[in-house]
Image: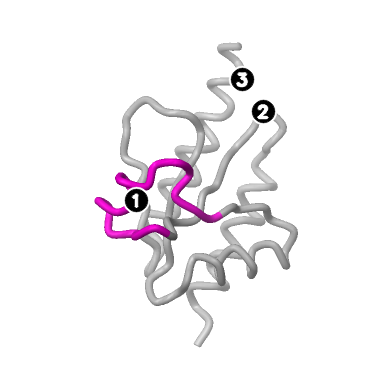
Amino acid sequence: MAAVEAHEDRLRVRLETTLRAMPGIRVYSNARDRTPTILFTIAGQDPQATRIALAEKGINAPVGNFYALECSRHLGLGDAGGVRLGLAPYSDDADIDRLIAALDELTTKP
């Protein structure tokens, strides 16, 4: 299991570092030790629109407060919440590349 954890953590760090550097993306995942998930929003874009745009590219990124309604409200996300990206043992660098390209397109479109 240590190898799986190391694999997922490496991908999460790569993805999270990139997302935090992208204009317009706000990452809400800040815990040092956590599962390989990232909660984010794109400035000026409804999280459902982000989910739909990613789904059209074959990327599953659910939206919601994920049973953490009070936390979602505290973060300023309201009842709707944000977009969640989850990595798994079968995720790889090509998946991260595809996701980053899709998000880059979403954040640079006029």
Residue tagged 2: 89
Q: Dot 1 surroundings within 10 Å: few (below 14), some, or many (20 or more)? A: some
Question: Disc 3 or disc 1, which is closer to the eye?
Answer: 1
The residue furthest left is 74
Q: Quadrant of the N terminus?
A: top right
Tell me, yes or no, whether the two marked residues, 2 and 3, touch with CB atoms within 8 Å: yes
Residue 27 at x, y percent in the picture:
37, 52
**Mark 2, secondary structure of its residue:** loop
Q: Determine if the magenta segment contains residue 76.
A: yes
Residues drawn in magenta: 63-79
Mark earlier in primary sequence (2, 3): 3
Numbered circle sitting on residue 72:
1
Taking the image as shown, residue 13 lies to the left or right of residue 100, namely left
**Mark 1, secondary structure of its residue:** helix
Tell me, yes or no, whether the two marked residues, 3 and 1, touch with CB atoms within 8 Å: no
Tell me, yes or no, whether the two marked residues, 2 and 1, touch with CB atoms within 8 Å: no
Q: Residue at x 69, y 62 (%)?
A: 55
The residue furthest top is 1
Residue tagged 3: 4
